[in-house]
Image: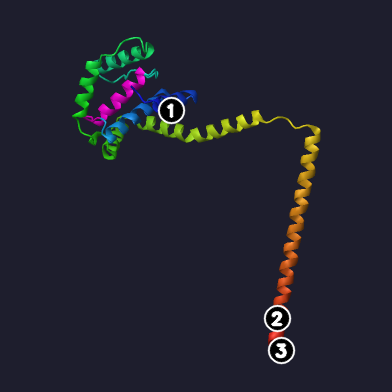
Amino acid sequence: MPEKETLERAEKDKREGKAASTQAGEFIREEIEHVREGKHGARSTKQVIAIGLSKARRAGVKLRPPKKASKKTREQAARDTRKGKSAGKGKKSAKRSRAIFGALKREGRSAASEKALSRQARSAAAKRSAASRSRSAKKAAAKPAKKTAKAAKKVAKKRRPLSPEARAKLAQNLVKARAARAAKGRAAKRAAKTTKSAKKTSKRVAKKR
């Protein structure tokens, strides 16, 4: 069963309109943390990812079954998706859950190491075409700009139009602020001039001595 925080993060991703793969990433991250903490092990990095994807589908994330996977994997993905749609209806077998957890407990933890994850990422990237990688990079680069634009729109919607009195007051305050800045600048110039002349005078006095 996924942790409450993981479900909340996945739900937040969904509300923000992020892709199903991004939502599933929260479950994969949880599995990686579990292996690193020693809650259970995994035979390979692929198994860690597979467990995370299975959890995501069962939690209701709309992930499509992989096209290039084996028939067995596609069937398992379809089964997980069905269980996600009918969550809470079927009773889980405690005996099977204990057996699975016991088998994973006997596996090592190296599958979630940084080196193993890096190797898996490189292997997955090598299978993709250059065009596919380029599209992903461009999409990732465009996301921050979209977020900024959305945030600006939200702020603009929340702002109420100013009344004529409020506008007049704002204009007066701006004039006052500009005048104060100008006066401060003039005072600073006068002080600098005075300091300069004082230095010159002290130099002349020193020379006469």
Q: Answer with mark 2 or mark 1, whichever residue precedes in sequence.
A: 1
The reply, left or right, for residue 109 in relation to residue 19 is left
Q: Which circle, 3 or 1, is nearer the viewer?
A: 1
Q: Position of residue 181 (x, y in %)?
A: 74, 54
Residue type, numbered disc 3: Lys
Q: Answer with mark 3 or mark 1, whichever residue precedes in sequence.
A: 1
Report the magenta residues as a range. Answer: 40-58
Task: Measure the C-alpha gap from mark 3 to mark 2.
Answer: 10 Å
- In the picture as drawn, the residue positioned furthest to the bottom comes out as 209
Number of other residues with Cα within 10 Å of mark 1, as a class: few under 14, some 14 to 19, many 20 or more: some
Q: Kindly identify which residue carries mark 1.
A: 9
Number of other residues with Cα within 10 Å of mark 2, as a class: few under 14, some 14 to 19, many 20 or more: few
Q: Position of residue 102 (x, y in %)?
A: 20, 24
Residue type, numbered disc 2: Ser
Q: Kindly identify which residue carries mark 3.
A: 208
Residue in the picture at 30% in, 11% down: 91
The reply, left or right, for residue 72 in relation to residue 171 is left
Q: Answer with mark 3 or mark 2, whichever residue precedes in sequence.
A: 2
Secondary structure at numbered mark 3: helix
